[in-house]
Image (cartoon, rainbow, N blue to C red):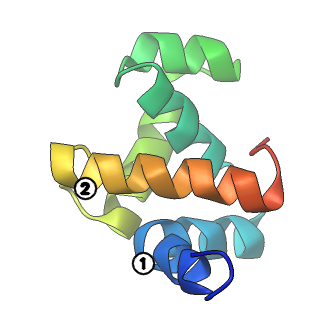
Amino acid sequence: MKQTGSLESFFDENIGSLLSYDREKSGQLLKTLKIYLAQSGSKQETAKELFIVRQTLYHRLDKISVLLGDDYMHPHKRIAIELALHGYEYMHGVIS
């Protein structure tokens, strides 16, 4: 996938809107999503890991939902997003 360029297409399809938003607004949505998924959707643990108040986390999750769609936590879509996050880190380094 890396050699054919289809890996970048996979990123664009699954997390491209977050990548664009973070670039344009100097946001933290990609990191927030990565940690939220790693914490199995626990808002309390995610906020603690990010060192932010829960209200800030809710705002970010609302924005993620707008950009990725309300169904981003449904199993089929979540797996694709997690794979895209791991692949993105493989190609571009750790999301921080």
Which of 44/19 is in front? 19
Give the amino acid at mark 2: Lys
Q: Is residue 63 left or right of residue 79?
A: right
The percent coordinates of residue 74 (x first, y second) are 17, 46
Q: Which residue is mark 1?
A: 13
Secondary structure found at label 2: helix
Q: Residues within 10 Å of mark 1 (few under 14, many from 20)?
A: some
Q: Residues within 10 Å of mark 2 (few under 14, many from 20)?
A: some
Which residue: 63% across, 76% down? 20
Q: Which residue is mark 2?
A: 77
**Circle on res. 58:** none
Which residue: 45% across, 19% down? 39
Q: Is residue 56 visible?
A: no
**64 is higher (above) or lower (below) than 49:** below
The percent coordinates of residue 79 (x first, y second) are 32, 47
**73 is higher (above) or lower (below) than 36:** below
Which residue: 19% across, 52% down? 76
Which of 77/5 is in front? 5
**90 is higher (above) or lower (below) than 73:** below
The percent coordinates of residue 4 (x first, y second) are 61, 88
Secondary structure found at label 1: helix
Which residue: 60% across, 79% down? 8
Task: Pick the quarter of the image with the N terminus.
Answer: bottom right
The percent coordinates of residue 49 (x first, y second) are 64, 16
Give the amino acid at mark 1: Glu
